[in-house]
Image (tube, rainbow, N blue to C red):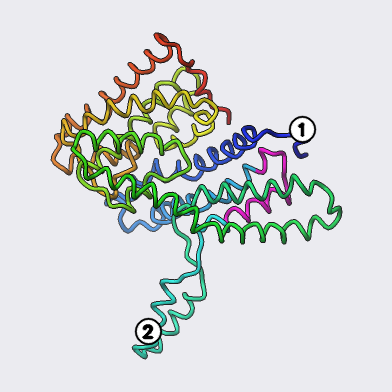
Amino acid sequence: MTQSKKLTVGQFLTKVLNGTAIAVLVGLIPNAILSVLLTNQLFKGNEFILMWHTANVLFQAVIPALMGALIAFEFGFKGLKAASVAAATYVGSGVTTKAVVVSNLLKQSQELGNEELIKNAKTVANGFLTAGTGDIINAMLVASLGVLLLLVLQDRLGSLNIILIPILSVLVSVIGLYTLPYVKSITTEIGVLIKNFTELQPYLMSILICVSFAILIVSPISTVAIGLAIGLTGLSAGASAMGVASTTMVLIVHSFTVNKPGVTIAVALASMKMMMPNVFRHPIVYINIVTTAVLCALLVPTFHIVGTPASAGFGLVGLTGLFASIDGGLSPILAVVSWIFLPLGIAILTRYLYTKVWRLYTPEVFKFDA
């Protein structure tokens, strides 16, 4: 059964964000929780553990398909229609692409004249490469187009639905493949802007980077992708991770009183983006997110909290930011204080000020509806 009443733009976007939030939660949680354990040297060479870790990584790759299906469900579509939106979203996200790198390797192999290598390269070159999670923004765009198509068509195609809807959905995914490079450029441009911040004085740089990542973590844009793409290192990497950590603390202290424990634990572990719909519906909470990020940013140059491109954008996920700062010379005790206790204290303080003293909003705005 599909939506019968007219939807406002806000309602439409909320449904898209709801589906996206659950999809990201399902796709990221397994690897976020278990990656450190399963890649531990203790299990090196264990075939089952290796397969388990591989499955966790592949779970992340199907996030676009999950998004498509769940967004379709939000609009009341199921069966053939939901499956078609899921397939279109997966293809249009760019998570799976033609193995261009291998094609280049094939050309080099042909130049070398190694027949066995050429044979193997040809086999792989005809395949596809799956990596990462695809572009979440483009996946949302493709899913939205797929849903809009279904809303327009309704049941006008009659018995031809079973044939034409999958075909039309493929065309939607083709549109997504055309928009993909342009949508990706959004992330690139944001990265360029943040890269410019690294040339500023340490405290100002830390504040701007920390606030940027604090905002981005509750958006469809990947903080990890930006951190890796622009190669944040040293204090800038520490500031980016601290921005993610500060928003995590804001979400935790608000979620704790209004959601079931599982929701708060999920946020603490890796699923900050599951709160995207809440932030979209109540943008007033950005005041708290930004305030907390500014205060937490001051910790970065004060305690010389550093990181690497691999830790930038992760925050407290897997304690990546914390361990990176320890590797950078911060004492373990000071690392725990600066990454957990101080940000938590700041988040509790800002929550009290904004909800109890100034009453700008209530914690209920963070109520998560699965």
- Amino acid on which disc 1 is placed: Lys
SS at mark 1 in the image? loop
- Amino acid on which disc 2 is placed: Ser
**How far, Cα to Cα, is label 1 from label 2?**
59 Å
The quarter of the image holding the N terminus is top right
> Residue 58 in the image: x percent, y percent?
48, 54
- Is residue 331 shown above or below 184? above
Q: Nearer the viewer, residue 57 or 143?
A: 143
Residue under the image location 48 percent in, 61 percent down: 130
Residue under the image location 55 percent in, 38 percent down: 22
- Is residue 196 shown above or below 345? below
Magenta stretch encompasses residue 13: no
Most frequent secondary structure within the magenta stretch: helix
Span of residues in magenta: 72-90
Q: Closer to the N terminus: mark 1 or mark 2?
A: 1
Q: Nearer the viewer, residue 32 or 182?
A: 182
> Residue 242 in the image: x percent, y percent?
29, 35
Mark drawn on residue 5:
1
For label 2, the residue is 109
Q: Quadrant of residue 206?
A: top left
**Label 2 crowding class (10 Å Cα cut-off): few <14, some 14-19, many 20+?**
some
Residue under the image location 46 percent in, 37 percent down: 273
> Residue 81 in the image: x percent, y percent?
72, 50
Q: Nearer the viewer, residue 203 or 99?
A: 203
**Label 1 crowding class (10 Å Cα cut-off): few <14, some 14-19, many 20+?**
few
- Judge from the rendering whether residue 188 lies leftward or rightward of residue 148; answer left or right: left
